[in-house]
Amino acid sequence: MPLTKEDIAKRIARELKDGYFVNLGIGIPTLVANYIPEGINVEIQSENGVLGMGPFPFEGEEDADLINAGKQTITTLAGASFFDSAMSFGMIRGKHVDLTILGAMEVAENGDIANWKIPGKMVKGMGGAMDLVSSAENIIVAMMHVNKEGESKILKKCTLPLTGVGCVKKIVTELAVMEITPKGIKLLERAPGISVEHIIASTEANLIIEGDIPEMVID
Amino acid sequence: MINKKVNSVQEALEGIYDNATIMFGGFGLCGIPENAIAELVQKGTKNLSCISNNAGVDDFGLGLLLQKRQIRKMTSSYVGENAEFERQMLSGELEVELIPQGTLAERCRAAQAGIPAFYTPAGYGTEVAIGKETREFNGKMYVMEQAFNADFSIVKAWKGDTAGNLIFKGTARNFNPVMAGAGKITIAEVEELVEAGSLDPNQIHIPGIFVQRIFQGEKYEKRIEKRTVRKRE
């Protein structure tokens, strides 16, 4: 069975390490906050200027002055802090944020990522994504393996305008966990019940496959 | 004490002219100078070049100026929530420069701090870097970006005093502190304006030297763009 979006988030949550400062992008990455493993302390940074982001507020307790980068109302946890946008991106470019998890439209086998523009069709802007991917040591992409037309989003070369070059370290989709290595994309894990052949058929990029590929552990 | 207080939004925006370049604080609809924006709509100032992280929504924030076609150019990082914006951009009526959010913030800060340009890794190897100087430092490539040159900065704070000192609340801080003092004239609107001496100097986020005019906004809607809540257990 391909993973649900929640399961993709759960699998990525297993990549979190104690003491990490983490920036979560919009979409599946935001869900990762719901599945932080027991005993792992992380602080979530939102680039609009908050560190120590908490869950959504209870109904009636929303504060217009307290949102995340997805413009959703949020709360803060003990130890939280607020800061301006220049300091926020200082944290990001200065490599004080340990892990960036974001969505993508395309990822290439050299780690290039495209996620901000479809020429002539959709231009939403890059927001903080270009700053994040140009600086983070550890970047995990959370996305669906194929687009709505059924075409692979994992390519030999990106076709859309790039957000960053050679920066993605790992990709987690509904089908597989993959690592970007200097030699190309290495298949690490497959979704429960999904065959290696299925993953190869869904991927335009070449996959490096060594030995038996284990099933993902989700919970 | 130099008194920066003006008595109305009209007085605060006096001298803003057609074709001006204006920075607007705020992230989404959070921390935007909503009284000043409403007054600019009233005044009908045209051909504005706006520097703002976002472009508001169709019927609030900078979306109000877009509706009236008062904006000629937008410099932003993310404009995804505004259908009228998208229409004007795709039809070519509106000039749009999209830049990375951290670059936008730093170009403000550089203007505030008298730094003409800086190098950032953001956008290297992408179309954002086209036509810009690039340079290698310690084995990594960077793009040179220049400080903004704006005529006015319009920022919003939670509290302020008559000396122009500002205190922000929550994530309504965002771009406001880095835009203060980045334009030639900075106009600050605040929810609560108090006499100089009433605020603890230890708690000031932005010193009054960066602010030329300050006024208390008449009313604040503080609209929430995406109300997200959880159920009580």
Image (tube, rainbow, N blue to C red):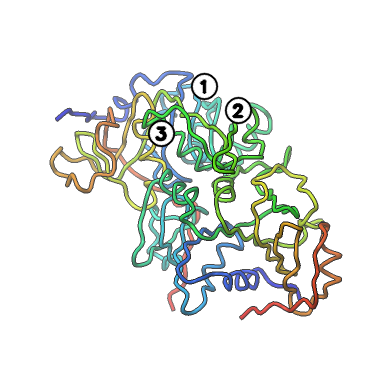
Residues flagged by tags 3 and 1 on a common chain? yes
**Label whose residue precedes the other's in the sequence (3 or 1):** 3
The numbered dot on residue B38 is: 3
Instruction: Identify the element where label 2 is drawn.
Output: strand
**Residue drawn where x is 52% and y is 71% of the image:** A34
- Quarter of the image with the C terminus of chain A is bottom right
**Residue drawn where x is 44% and y is 79% of the image:** B233
Q: Nearer the viewer, residue B49 or A212?
A: A212
Q: Label 1 near label 2: C-beta < 8 Å?
A: no
**In the figure, B60 relative to A189: above or below?**
above
Image-quadrant location for residue A74: bottom left
The chain under label 2 reads B
Instruction: Identify the element where label 1 is drawn.
Output: loop
Instruction: Identify the element where label 3 is drawn.
Output: helix
Residue A14, image x, y percentages: 58, 73
Task: Point out the frontmost of discs 3 and 1.
Answer: 1
Q: Nearer the viewer, residue B28 or A158?
A: A158
**Alpha carbon of mark 2 to alpha carbon of mark 3: how far?**
22 Å
Furthest toward the front, the residue is B138
**Label whose residue precedes the other's in the sequence (2 or 3):** 3
The chain under label 3 reads B
Residue B46, image x, y percentages: 49, 21
**Alpha carbon of mark 2 to alpha carbon of mark 1: how far?**
11 Å
Q: Which residue is mark 1?
A: B47
**Mark 2 crowd level (few <14, some 14–19, many ≥20, 10 Å Cα):** some
Q: Hey, what amino acid is under mark 2?
A: Glu
Q: Which residue is mark 2?
A: B95
Q: Hey, what amino acid is under mark 3?
A: Ala
**Label whose residue precedes the other's in the sequence (2 or 1):** 1
- Give the total number of marks visible in the rendering: 3
